[in-house]
Amino acid sequence: MHINGVEIEDTFAEAFKMRGARLIITAVNPRWALTAAQVTTGFGTSVIACGCEAGIEAVIPADETPDGRPGVSVLIFTMGSKGMENQLMRRVGQCIMTCPTTACFNGLESDEMLKIGGTLRYFGDGFQSSKRLEGRRLWRIPVMEGEFLVEESFGIKKAIGGGNFLILGESPEATLEAAERAVEAMEKVREVVLPFPGGIVRSGSKTTSKYKFLHASTNTAYCPTIRRQTESALPEGVNSVLEIVIDGLDEEAVREATRVGIEAACRPGIVRISAGNYGGNLGQYHIHLRELWK
Amino acid sequence: MTTTILRLKEPITLPVEAKSVSPDRFVGLRQEEVAALPVLFGRRQLTLGDLFAVEGDGTEKTVIEGDLSHIKRIGQGMSQGRITIHGNVGMHLGAKMCGGEIVVHGNVDAWAGAHMSGGLIRVHGNAGPMLGAAYPGEKRGMCGGVILIDGDAGPRAGERMRRGLIAVQGNLGEFAGARMIAGSLFVFGTLGARAGAGMKRGTIVALGEIADSLLPVFRYACSYRPAFLRYYLHRLREWGLPVTPEQVAGLFRRHTGDVTTLGKGEILVYDQ
């Protein structure tokens, strides 16, 4: 199968069950909303080393946010509920509450709720107060700038993490250009985020290592510089590989993002689109690339 | 028919207790069963059918037409459905209601929404005294829900209020939010004298003038833009209240009190 002359390898991405949450961050202007969102999602690339995977889902216009201010929606993914509570407490408390003019609202209605604002409120040292309107409870925490407003509870739901595809290109420039185009296209898909820097991974990993103290190491089969020293998955003419990892609130959103991303990445200078998997033994979701167009 | 219609047969001057007028009582009843529901006319036991021409079987939606100024307790304790009233209504409208919606195209008398814990009361007219308040001897007034008044409201609105929202587009009588425990009370017109007397917690928001200076038991804290207020004003605008962009983005002077009690209440005054 080819798209614009680029081969779509007959393989699949292996993705995992995760838990997802959505935060709506608002601020006095888009700059501060985006600043808070960027800090909140910082160091949130891989759940193994960062505790969560996080990214910006969308910029939200003022007339669509709960308080009528410019906003940004952020998705955060963890392996379980406990980890999510831990990450939300840290990130809302340290990255959003500290950021001037921000407020933080729950963006996901769910049966499973985690008390976040309801715990952060104690920062108010007894001077915190709550407001409840139509079942939504908000905590007002006095801070030096004025007040930080945070929702009592945040919903979490079953989600999917680790969707991915690999872009195998003739040159670093062509590969990066294709990856950037893919990210641009995928950013329009809601309910997904691309948790790595700029949405792109240059150092994909495998789950084994020659060193006993390491659980993961560089994806040797896709490293062009060592293709003659180890078993390589790279066809001749490929000199650079970039990966795009996708986390989403449901499988359909991840499939859609993968499809539009691959279509955008199939450009001159790209040889093949592949995907990372572990033989199908670890992940609960298998996203077969060629089936995305059926 | 999906609506039950009650038309007042002739003007009434004696007080009527009509707590049977509620969707909770009407649903599932046939027309004649609705008409047979009891009301207290003065000291006499009558039926709804004696006072009203009833149209349609009992449903979740009820429309009432006529001058109901002497008819009390309509929608008392209701938990579902909608009552629409074309005319003025007597005391205790929607008292203790916990759900559903009451819309009045007219004025309402005292104690509307007293002790209500949920639902919505919308009055396209004025409200009498003790709106959403507590009955004498009771510790807590309104405990939830929303009351929206297009006109003015009488004295002691939100007295001992514990939770919920009252928004008055016109003027608010004296002692608004007195002994308030929590909740939110908005006034777009003039805030009456002695507002918030004895309040422990809760919020009174004055978007217009203040009839008299605030009680000295309230202390000025700062001028700021409360984030939660944007959320509330945004919602009030969705309900059709005349919230201006300047009010949404504006500065508010925060006065905390009543310092003779817990002192965690606040009066937010729009800095025009």
Image (tube, coloured by chain):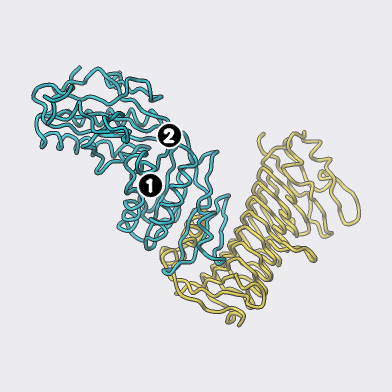
Residue beneath the point at 67% across and 57% down? B143
- Marks 2/1 in contact by CB < 8 Å: the verdict is no
Q: Badge 1: how crowded within 10 Å, few (<14), some, or many (20+)? A: many
Residue B92 at least partly seen: yes
Quadrant for residue B267, please give it: bottom right
Residue topped by disc 1: A73
Chain of the residue that carries numbered disc 1 in the rendered image: A
* Image location (x, y in percent) of residue B271: 46, 74
Residue beneath the point at 37% across and 33% down? A161
Under circle 2, the secondary element is strand
Tell me, for residue A18, which label it has, or none. 2
* Image location (x, y in percent) of residue A97: 42, 59
- Nearer to the camera, A106 or A48: A48
Residue B67 at least partly seen: no
Circle count: 2
What hue represents chain B? yellow
Q: Badge 2: how crowded within 10 Å, few (<14), some, or many (20+)? A: many
Specify the amino acid type for callout 2.
Answer: Met
- Nearer to the camera, A157 or A191: A157
Residue beneath the point at 55% across and 67% down? A127
- Nearer to the camera, A275 or B120: A275
Whether residue B56 sits left or right of residue A290 in the image: it is right
What hue represents chain A? cyan
Q: Mark 2 or 1 closer to N-term? A: 2
Q: Quick check: do tags 2 and 1 share a chain?
A: yes
